[in-house]
Image: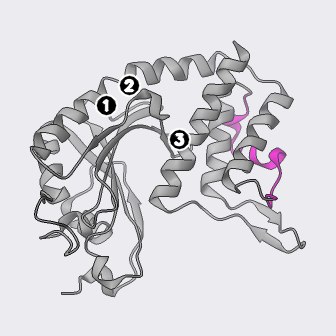
């Protein structure tokens, strides 16, 4: 049976300043509602729909504020493909930086249940992903999945004290222009895998709003993250063709690049220490 979301072109992601309803999630992440696992999964694969887990997490005070699902050209995988939810705890929904638990899953074998600490920065709507050192929980599709996912969510919550401490440390570090350019260059080299980037380090460290016109490490890191992830910057290819950089929309690319940028900021802390 072909779902409404498969037949019609719908937004690939959604973020609200309130919890998302099941009706909204059904349109954006239909694979979270799959009634069964993909045919490629064995009998040992314990199948629990992501929505069942989400309902249990809601009972614990966690609500989804962002959702996205991977696109696939394989028709029979559209209802099982990788999807991602960013959850907030009911008592941690406000502030300049809001802690979020990133819940990642699929029912086609491309991912276990994963929970990763993240941060949402209100001023620029940056969805940040903390580096792996802060804690990343992986729950395979077997055994007591519900209990282990709920336990994992609380375990990720406990990492946010360290994340906040890390952010405070970044705020306390002022960067010179060469240091800011060094970070920008590293970000472009990573994103474009060592190939010539269509934009410059000067462009990628540039602020988009007056509130970000500061040179501490935290603000610089967020400027780079926004410019690299959201794109929209005018540049030129190696052949001189004018282009605008694209937004990073894929789930794997988003997490991988986000974590790499945080890691670069961590290395700058070490350098400045």
| Residue 187 painted magenta | no
Q: Can residue 214 be seen in this view?
A: yes
Q: How far apart are marks 2 and 3 (CA)?
A: 15 Å
Mark 2 vs mark 3, foreground winner is 3
Q: What element carries label 3?
A: helix
Spot occupied by residue 175 in the image (x, y as percentages of width and height)? 77, 23
Q: Point out the frontmost of discs 2 and 1.
A: 1
- Given residues 252 and 40, the one toward you in this image is 40
Q: Which mark is residue 259?
A: 3
Name the residue beneath numbered marker 2. 160
| Secondary structure, magenta segment, majority class | loop
Answer with mark 2 or mark 3, whichever residue precedes in sequence: 2
Range drawn in magenta: 196-214
Q: Is residue 218 visible?
A: no
Cα separation, mark 2 vs mark 1, equals: 7 Å
Q: Contact, CB < 8 Å: mark 2 with mark 1?
A: yes
Q: Residue at x 32, y 87 (%)?
A: 7
Q: Is residue 8 above or below residue 268?
A: below
Q: Mark 1 points at which residue?
A: 156
Q: Residue at x 61, y 56 (%)?
A: 230
Instruction: Please identify the quadrant where the C terminus is shown.
Output: top right
Side of 24 relative to 147 (left or right): right
Q: Which of marks 1 and 3 is nearer the N terminus?
A: 1
Pinpoint residue 96: horizontal percent, then vertical percent.
Answer: 48, 31
Q: Quadrant of residue 68?
A: bottom left
């Amino acid at each position: 049976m072909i779902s409404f979301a498969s037949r019609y072109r719908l937004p690939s992601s959604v973020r609200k300043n309130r919890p998302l309803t099941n009706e909204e999630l059904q349109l954006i992440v239909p694979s979270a509602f799959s009634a069964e696992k993909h045919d490629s999964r064995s009998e040992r694969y314990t199948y629990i729909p992501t929505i069942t887990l989400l309902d249990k997490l809601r009972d614990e005070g966690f609500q989804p504020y962002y959702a996205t699902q991977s696109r696939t050209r394989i028709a029979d995988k559209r209802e099982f493909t990788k999807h991602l939810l960013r959850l907030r705890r009911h008592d941690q929904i406000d502030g300049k930086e809001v802690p979020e638990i990133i819940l990642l899953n699929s029912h086609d074998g491309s991912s276990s249940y994963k929970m990763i600490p993240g941060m949402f920065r209100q001023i620029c709507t940056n969805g940040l992903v903390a580096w792996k050192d802060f804690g990343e929980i992986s729950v395979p599709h077997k055994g007591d999945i519900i209990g282990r996912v709920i336990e994992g969510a609380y375990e990720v919550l406990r990492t946010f004290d360290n994340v906040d401490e890390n952010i405070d440390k970044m705020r306390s570090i002022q960067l010179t222009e060469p240091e800011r350019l060094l970070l920008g260059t590293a970000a472009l080299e990573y994103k474009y895998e060592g190939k010539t980037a269509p934009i410059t380090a000067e462009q990628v460290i540039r602020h988009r709003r007056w509130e970000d016109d500061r040179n501490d490490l935290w603000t610089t890191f967020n400027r780079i993250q926004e410019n690299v992830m959201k794109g929209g910057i005018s540049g030129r290819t190696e052949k001189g063709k004018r282009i605008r950089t694209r937004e990073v929309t894929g789930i794997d690319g988003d997490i991988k690049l986000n974590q790499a940028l945080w890691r670069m900021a961590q290395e700058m802390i070490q350098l400045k220490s």
